[in-house]
Image: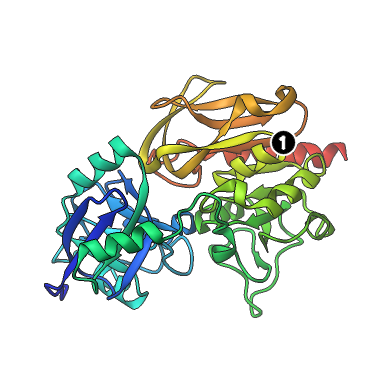
Amino acid sequence: MTTTTAKPAWLVLEDGTTFPGRSFGADGERFGEAVFNTAMTGYQEILTDPSYKGQIVCMTYPHIGNYGVNEEDVESHRPWLEGFVVRSLSPIVSNFRAQMSLEAYLQQHQIVAVDQVDTRALTLRLRREGAMKAGLSTVEPDPERLLKKVRESPGIVGVDLVQSVTCRQPYEWPAGGTAPLTAATRAGASSAKCHIVVVDYGVKYGILRQLAGLGCYLSVVPAAMPARGILAMKPDGIVLSNGPGDPAAVTYAIATIRELVGRAPLLGICLGQQLLGLALGGRTFKLKFGHHGANHPVQDLATGKVEITSQNHGFTVDLDSIPQRQVELTHVNLNDRTVEGMRHRQLPIFSLQYHPEASPGPHDSRYLFRQFLDAVEGASRSA
């Protein structure tokens, strides 16, 4: 059972729209970009996805928290979002895997959260007007004062959020493993099928587990590691991970990827695709309200098949801006026709805007990891 108090809270959008609610997380005040997520389940994965850094997330599904939280399903070592907004927090936790309630988890990690918000009205507002800056507070009783703070707060455009979520030191993940190596378990590189360097812009554990499950030994490196450091590790392939915010602000990553092109097979995922597009000379642009949820239809243009995908991004690649048509479109979003996948015409370089490691389909997109590793093996044979 939860122990939610009746302490009031406010969510205020930068256009002056206010939403009263009830606090059920940590006390405090947070600012970020308000977005909505259409997934019916998976709140724990959303909370711990580093791509949500800088955002206040509203869940459109009304009943949240009923299966609690466990330590096995997290996507990183902590929650990253700025605030969490739901319609109704479940008063009961009922799942044999639950280790604590959602409320206790948010309080433990100092995440400000609020329920009893009219999330339908909030979602409609964001759809009509677009994602916008917002403030979530349990300590400011006057929404007008909170609005002033919201308007003075920084947005996410032009802000490098990657430095807040990337690892500080390189670490390794064993082939077949479900967690990073420790000093006591460090072994297994020689028996792996291949060595993949993952550049951590905010990587989800699910990506690492998928690659490790296919027999890869992984070296995860900080976002700012230069190309020479990555290539010195002699990778068979390189993964450019997901992450938060505006790709154009991560200038050091763009410069590094430009040096990596043609040196090893590359796979870009989410922010990784956007950074790759910029490194190839293209542009990115901000979507009106982004793609956040676990039910986005994406078509594979090679087969015609439609995948049900998990997505979380607010920017996308302008494919036509990449000079000399170096890449071709491989996947397209069936809701708005935006770029969901691309492939270099001459080099073993692939990228995806959605998350192939997630399981809304449940396994519609897993083949993409296999395709990348086929390219890695092909490059190794021809070397």
Q: Is residue 95 visible?
A: no
- The residue where tag 1 is placed is 280
User: Tell me, what colour scheme is on the image?
Assistant: rainbow
* Quadrant assignment, res 333: top left
Element type where label 1 sits in the image? loop
Q: Provide residue 149's location: percent of width, then percent of height.
A: 34, 64
* Quadrant assignment, res 301: top right
* Quadrant assignment, res 170: bottom right
Q: Tell me which residue sits at (45%, 54%) in the image.
A: 155
Left or right: 20 with respect to 244? left
Quadrant assignment for the C terminus? top right
Q: Is residue 256 visible?
A: yes
Q: Depth check: 372 or 50 in front?
A: 50
Q: Depth check: 302 or 313 in front?
A: 313
Q: Provide residue 367's location: percent of width, then percent of height.
A: 55, 36
Quadrant assignment for the N terminus? bottom left
